[in-house]
Image (cartoon, rainbow, N blue to C red):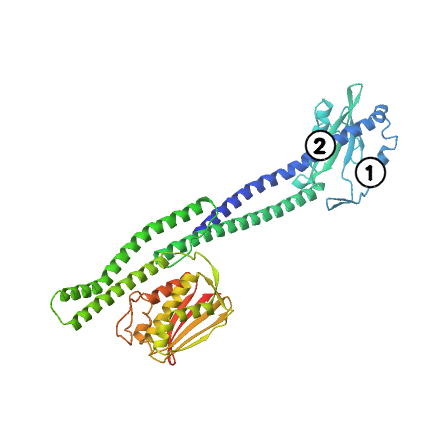
Amino acid sequence: MSLGIRIFLVYALFIGLTSYFVLSTVMEEIRPGVRQSTEETLVDTANLMAEILRDDFKAGTLNENRWPQLLEAYGERQPAASIWGLPKNQVNHRIYVTDDQGKVVLDSSGVAVGQDYSRWNDVYLTLRGQYGARSSRAVADDPNSSVMHVGAPIRDKGKIIGVVTVAKPNSSLQPYVDRTERRLVWYGIGLIALGLLFGALLSWWLSAALRRLTAYAQAVSEGRRAALPHYRGGELEQLATAVEHMRTQLEGKAYVERYVHTLTHELKSPLAAIRGAAELLQGEMPVEQQQRFVGNIGSESARMQQLIERLLDLAQVEQRQGLEERVEVPLAALIDTLLQSQSARIERKQLQVEQRIDPNLTLVGEPFLLRQAIGNLLENALDFTPAQGVLRFFAKQLGAQVEFSLFNQAEAIPEYALARLCERFYSLPRPDSGRKSTGLGLNFVEEVVQLHGGRMSIGNVPGGVQVTLHLPR
């Protein structure tokens, strides 16, 4: 299981447990909260009614006045109200009045007049000067039939002479409770989904950052060129810096060891030839032989110098992870400059040169490296092109890249050698001299092309050999 999935699962578990406990706690508080608010309203209503009914109750004229008719008319009212989107089409308060003995003398429902309510807490406690309230079921087996009752004392000169009770069924509050719970559930689901989405994005971002760093480390371990991932501060930036520092230290050490071994191996042959010629020159020999051995010393010295220069150029390119500058380089002008520098060899071999490149076509990269790379290709082509042969340059734009090709008339490259042409120190004998080159030219070209984000291919075509470079435009 990947690290990103593990992080997301832990985050999802945390969000789920937190949401469950928060939602369950809030849901448990909704119903009591609504009832508490309703009870507070009933207290106000009961005390208001106690003041309104006091004089008539004291005079004993409650049933003689219009109070029974008023309460009956109140019970028949249809408010047609919309409370937060919920319709209210009937009133739900029941109001009854008891005397100081707990006997009902007035009831808005008209069913309890004359009954003894002195044992109910709303009446019993209120007559004793306490807060009287109760919640009783209208149907014993139905918990949803409970009704809240709140009593308020009717006083005469400080003495309690009766009780007014205002009752409201809890079922009338249920729509508001249900609506609040539904909205809370939907809000909770939305917040959970948003939290999980945020967690998924966080896990994806962290995993992607680690994947880039892992890919970089893997590329370095395989010897491939890769750009160091960039992070903005934090532990990831420190980790990337540490990995890059470790790569520099380890790769530098291994690189030096490899190049020292390579250089010593390649210098053995020319040094042996120079030493042998020098030993022979110490003895007596004809002038012609002396000149031949002196020539050998000169050619082998030049070969050693060329080998060292090529190795230094290759080492400089291989150690770099990116370009130091990116400028537009006119391709046709670059080819003309290289042809001009090799004009003596071209004229000596009487080669036919065809340059078919649009003067407005440009590449993006380091001019010095591009000149060295294409110059190496031209030198290689001149080595293998026979006298009066053909060199052909052409290029075309392919989207964001330029396809540049160099064709030279030559014998076909052997099949066994095609896959090894870009190997370091691998070279084929030159047709004119039969000698091999340093075997670093094409390897250098490939490194430069890859540094520019391109690719190179070499293959046999009818009439000769063609090298193709795909470089950014």
> Which amino acid, by three-letter code, is at mark 1?
Tyr
Viewer can see residue 51: yes
Q: Which mark is residue 185?
A: none
What residue is disc 1 on?
74
Report the mark closest to the observer, 1 or 2: 2
Residue 177 percent coordinates (x, y) = 67, 42
Percent x, y of residue 368: 41, 61
Observer able to see residue 141: no
- Residue 132 appears at what percent x and percent y? 71, 27
* Relative depth, front residue between 80 and 398: 398
Q: Position of residue 354 (x, y in %)?
A: 43, 77
For this orientation, the residue located farthest to the right is: 65
Query: Which residue is drawn at the image coordinates 69% and 43% (left, top)?
Result: 176
Above or below, 242 against 221 in this view is above
Describe residue 426's horizontal placement relative to residue 401 as left or right.
left
Q: Is residue 326 left or right of residue 351?
A: right
* The quadrant where residue 407 appears: bottom left
The residue at which mark 2 appears reads as 40
Q: CA distance from mark 1 to mark 2?
A: 21 Å
In the figure, residue 446 lies in which quadrant?
Answer: bottom left
- Bin the neighbour count of mark 1 within 10 Å (Cα to Cα): few under 14, some 14-19, many 20 and up: some
Does residue 70 lie above or below 276 as drawn?
above
Q: Helix, strand, or loop for circle 1? A: helix
Query: In the current view of this chain or complex, which residue is farthest to the left?
Result: 284
Q: Amino acid at mark 2?
A: Glu
Nearer to the camera, 350 or 76: 350
Say which residue appears at 27% left-offset and 65% top-offset.
Answer: 302
Residue drawn at 74 percent across, 34 percent down: 167
